[in-house]
Structure formats: C-alpha cells, structure tokens
Image (spheres, helix red, strand yellow):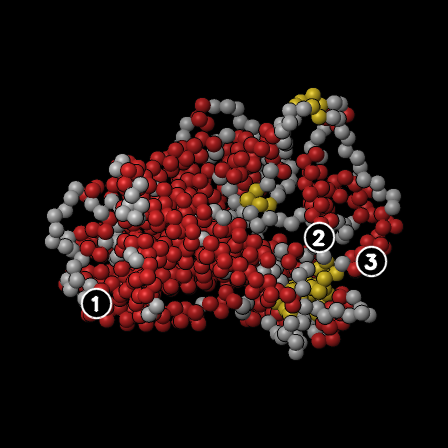
Amino acid sequence: MYLAALLTSAGINIAVCVVIFSLYSILRKQPRFMNVYFGQKLAHAKSRRQDPFCFERLVPSASWIVKAWEASEDQICAAGGLDALVFIRLIVFSIRIFSIAATICISLVLPLNYYGHDMEHKVIPSESLEVFSIANVQKGSKRLWAPCLALYVISCCTCALLYHEYKSITKLRLLHITEALSNPSHFTVLVRGIPSSQTESYSETVAKFFSTYYASSYLSHKMVYQSGTVQKLMSDAGKMYKMLKTCTREQQCGPNLMRCGLCGGTTSSFKMLAIESQNDKGRSDSDAADLRRKECGAAFVFFRTRYAALVAAQSLQSQNPMKWVTERAPDPKDVYWTNLGLPYRILWIRRIAIFVVSILFVAFFLVPVTLTQSLVNLDKLQNTFPFLKGILKRKFMSQLATGYLPSVILMLFLYMAPPLMLFFSTMEGAVSRSGRKLSACIKLLYFMIWNVFFANILTGTIIKNLVGEVARRLQDPKNIPNELATAIPTTATFFMTYILTSGWASLSFEILQPLALICNLFYRYALRNKDESTYGTWTFPYHTEIPRVILFGVMGFTCSIMAPLILPFLLVYFFLAYLVYRNQILNVYVTKYQTGGLYWPTVHNATIFSLVLTQIIASGVFGIKKSPVASSFTFPLIILTLLFNEYCRQRFLPVFKRNAAKVLIEMDWQDEQSGKMEETRQKLQSAYCQLTLTTLHQDATLHEHPGETVASGLQDLENLDSGKTQTSGLWAGHSSPEIKELHAM
C-alpha cells in the first residue's frame, strides 16, 4: 500500500467525522432529542421545560467538548460509577504511553527506517508504506540500536504507569466497598445446587440447612422462582400499560380521527378499565401454592453480619461440590433472574458447548478476514487474476480499494460479534448483568485479538507467499517469532486504515447514537407516543468499547518500533475517545449496575500480553536483521516484564477477587455502634424482589389505585436488557439544578 492510499482513507474518515460531529452538535440542541443525548441528566431530573425556538439551535458548536474536558473524575464516578472511571483511566493510560512512544519513535526510529537503505526515494505520497517500517533497514545495520533503545523506554514507562494505575484503582475499589454501607449484597449469599426432597420444599430445605450449620449468623432467605413465558407476557403488558396510561379521559371516550403512523388508518375509541379486586383474598392462598411449585434450586440467603456472609460464600458447604454451591450475591439491581433458575449441574455442559460454538464462529470469521487482506494486496493478486489489472489502472479506485474498503468490510462483519458474545455469556449461566458484560468483554477481546490481529497477519502472509511454504515454516514453533517479525511491518499498513475506520469513524457514530435516534423517531412518529419516559435509556456498552480500545493498544505496542507511522493516527483516536466517552458517560448512558472496577485486571493482563508480544517480535526482527546483540538484549526485558506482572498479580489482584475480612468486620462494628445494623437487616427481604406483583401490599394499595398498582408490579417484573433500561418518574418542578444545567448546554 502506498502513502497516497492511506491519505485517501484518512481524508474520507476525517470528512465523515466532521460532518457527523457537526450534525451531533445541532441535534443535541433539539428538545425532541433530549432523551437521546441527555438520558443521564433526565434520569436524575424532575422536569423538562420547552424552550422557544431560536436560530442558535441550528448552528454547530463545540460547547460539549469544553464541558467534557472540564469534568472532574469525581463527576465521572458520580455519573457512571467506578467502571466508567476505570474506562476513562484506560484511555488516559493509552494517551500517556503512546505519547511517549510517539515522541521517541517518530523522532528517532522513523528517520532511521526511512533512510535504512541506500536508495533513491520517490515523492513522499508515492512512497510505499513499507519504506517507513523496520523492513527497510538493511541486515547487519548498526542503526538497530535505536529500536532496541525505544523498546526499553516503552517497556519501562508502561510498567511504571501500569503499577501506578493498578495501585490507584485498587484503592478506589476498596473505597467503593467501604462507602456502600447499606449495600444488601454484603449480607447476602447466592446458593445454588439445592438438593431436592420429596417431603420438603426447597424453601424448607434451605431454612433447615442454614439454621443447623449457621445457627448464630443465619437471618432468613428468599427463594428464586421459575420465570418463563407468562412473566415475559406480563412484562410486555406492563410496557403497553405504561404507554396507554398517559391517555386523557377525552381520548378514551371519543373516536380518534388521527391516522395511525404505521398503516394510515383511523383508530377506534378505547377505554382503560380498572382491575377488579373482589377475589384478591381468595387468590392469595392459591398464589402462594403456585409459587411453592415454581421454586427453583437457588435462593438468596441473608446473614446477620457481612463477615458471616463472607465466610459462607467462600466455604465449601458439602462433600459434593455440585450441591450447596455458594457465592457472593450480586447487587439487587444487577441480578439476572432468568439464569438463576438454571440447574447448576448442567452449567458445565453449557460452557463446553459455548466453547465449541465459539471456535466454529472464529473459523467462520476467517472468510471476511481473507477478503479484506485480498483487497489490501490487490497488487499481489493481479498476476493470478488478470481482470484486476483494469481496476488498478484507475488511481483513485486503486487507492479506495486498497486503503479504505478493506477496513470498512471488516468493521461491518465485526458488528455481529458483540451481540453473539453477549448471547454466549448469557447461555453460560451468568447470574448478574455486570458479570454477563464482563464475560462478553473477555470473549470479545480474545476474538478481536485473534481475528483482527493474528488472522490478518496470517492471511496477509499466505496471500503474499506460497501457502505450502508458509505452512511448512509455521510447523516449527521456533519460526513463529520470525514469521511475525516479517509479517507485522507489512500488515501494519492495514492496521493504520483499520484505526481510521473502526476508530475515528466509530467514535463519530458513537456520539451520534443512530440506533437511539431511530428508536426515538419510531416512537414519536410511527407509534405517535409522546410520553418520553417510555422511550427508555441505555447503559454503557463496556463489552464492546473496552475490547476495541485494548485492541488498538495491541496494535500500537506491536507496531510502535516496527512501523512508527501508526502512532499519530492512534493518538488522534485516543484524544477523540477521551472527549467522546466522557461526554457520553456524563450525558447519555444511565448506570443501573456495575462491577466495581473488575475490568481493570483484564486491561492489565492484556497490556502485559501486548508488551511481551512486542518484545518477542522485536527479538525476531533483530534476529532476522542479523543483530545478535540487540536480539539478546530483549530477553532480559521479557523476563523482567513477566516478573513485574507476577508481582502485580500477587499484590493487587486478590482485592478484585475477594473482599477483605478486615474491611467487612470494621464495617459491621461501625453499623453496630451507630445503630444502623438492625435497619439494614429489615431491608434485606425487600431488596431482592423477583415477583414484585405477588409481594405488593395489595390489601391497602390495590383498592385505592388498582390500575397504578398493577402497572407498577408489572413494570418491576421486567427483565432489564443489557443495553436498554426503562426509566420512570413524572416531571415536576422547574427549578431543578439538573434542568438548569441541561438547558445551559
């Protein structure tokens, strides 16, 4: 690929970014799109004022950039929780390390690569990108001390920054635990694999077991019930009720001559009926019997102290590890109720099945990867396929086909991966929504590193060389570093275009929120629903964004000394990501649940992997270039990096795996002294509520407001989606500070 093709791709993506950012700055000022671009603000506000039209709404502005830049870490943490702060810290870490790498590699390594051969250079736009890589350096050259020195500087700075961030986030996690004094999950243990009995119900079995073996600390328990099609229908009915309850009495009684937004016909008059409550007492006994028959082999068990719950969660309860399996309970808002009813004994079968299906999906994805590399190497394929020569004669078409289309095609295929990985994590039996996203994040990270990084390198090498020759050389594991060292400098050209397309352009679509925008228009004009509280809000997609940022980090590390030209494009992406994601966390995404910073160990491990991979590849490159001194100097660096990782694993990782007993005991003492312990215990039963409709105070509330009570119960039954949650609440009061801030934007 030539530099002109890369510049063509950059120009197209810059134009797309400018247009979409300008469009966003206009759309965010329109009152009808406030729920799209200010979901976080509206979720905490009380009212919304309809401002009169002004011409300023149609003029693009950069005010959102200033507000996103000025926001403090405390504001980020308050809006998005500790997970949001961890994500922003990841971007800040990337900006710092790649700024250091760009400074040393652009000023020192890039000139030596460019003049590595005694050759007559063309005009820079007509130069091949391989001229700017280490592939252009002659064998046995003494200039290889420069990339070796750059590798040492990058490795040392990376380890220092990683240690600083790991230490800081560990303190924040401990602070997150200690500040949540009334968190019911600290007193609760999730029990699965409860043995069935012909004489006792699951509830009686749980009460008998914990009353016997935890007599002094056991408080009570709450069973998990089967949730099937009926519950899904009830939740859908709750959604429909919420949409219809806003109708006024006039709308209910008279015919509606307004045409339907979908079919164009007129609608008939309808009337919302109150629910009859005469037979409520007669149903209560039968409902209790039905609930007993629907009990699952899982329960939430409540303990008197946090320390007692910790001991129970970390202990083996039975000689059979498949029975009485205990673990820390997720936060009440974080529980994924659907998976709690799965029999614990079949979960391992599900995991094996998902592993096999994942391998098949990875194998299938080699098809689009091969297609993209074929486009990148069109000049190599024209000898095999003569019809390509006519296409490549047109300069612009050649630059478009080799510089822009490959990354676009790969990015379009990659859009199917996140939903599938989230589905795989659900099928594995995740018991919490945050845990499901964390599992999907790890799966997607493995998938993207293999398919976007390694598979592109492999297919690119096969296309450029004979298949049999490449396969023969890869049979010996000793040749793998050398093959990577040969392939990465040439494949780095594709990585540059991928950063432009999947990085720059994806950020512009992230801030525009096209899916939420389409949903807003559909609700407003197709369904003619004016109640914006039913439109829903979105949670931050950590399972897609964290793997993307880490993947760009892998590309940046491995190509930093091989092809330094990638670093400026990477830095532009991280600076844009810093502004865009801060704006989204502050204004758009609503936080319903979080992991408490559990994403950082994954970030740390992926960064160490990238660093060690870079060092191994550098050792292979130095060996190919006949520089044994530089090659031997990289081995101590690999050993020191692995030792550093092991120290961090021993020093910080246990805090993310288990809660410290000392911290929980001190929290128990503090609650006992302040008198809050008894109040917290009384709230435990109502905290974990799966079937809210059954546990409502029906005798008093239902007779007073039957319609509203049933709607509330149905709404509570709704299983919140990983990406979308419903917000409720009426807007009242115009003096809210959130509203003033909202309109000031």
Question: Quadrant of residue 645 in the image?
Answer: bottom left
Out of 736 and 693, give the one closest to the viewer.
693
Q: Earlier in the sequence, mark 1 or mark 3?
A: 3
Residue tagged 1: 630
Q: CA distance from mark 2 to mark 1?
A: 63 Å
Which one is in front, 444 or 222?
444
Report if the CB atoms under discs 1 and 3 are less than 8 Å apart: no
Residue 737 sits above or below residue 117 on the image: above
**Residue depicted at 24% across the width and 44% down the height:** 3
Q: Where in the figure is residue 591, as x and y percent of width and height?
A: 55, 49
Which SS class for mark 1? helix
Q: Which residue carries the number 3 mark?
A: 289
Q: Secondary structure at mark 3?
A: helix
Which circle's residue, 2 or 1, is located before the other in the chain?
2
- Relative image position of residue 652 (x, y in whole percent): 45, 67
Please tell me how crowded label 3 is: few (under 14), some (14-19), or many (20+) other residues with Cα within 10 Å: few
Labelled pair 2, 1 in contact (Cβ < 8 Å): no
What's the mark number on residue 228? 2
Front residue of 526 and 488:
488
Q: Position of residue 513 (x, y in %)?
A: 49, 39
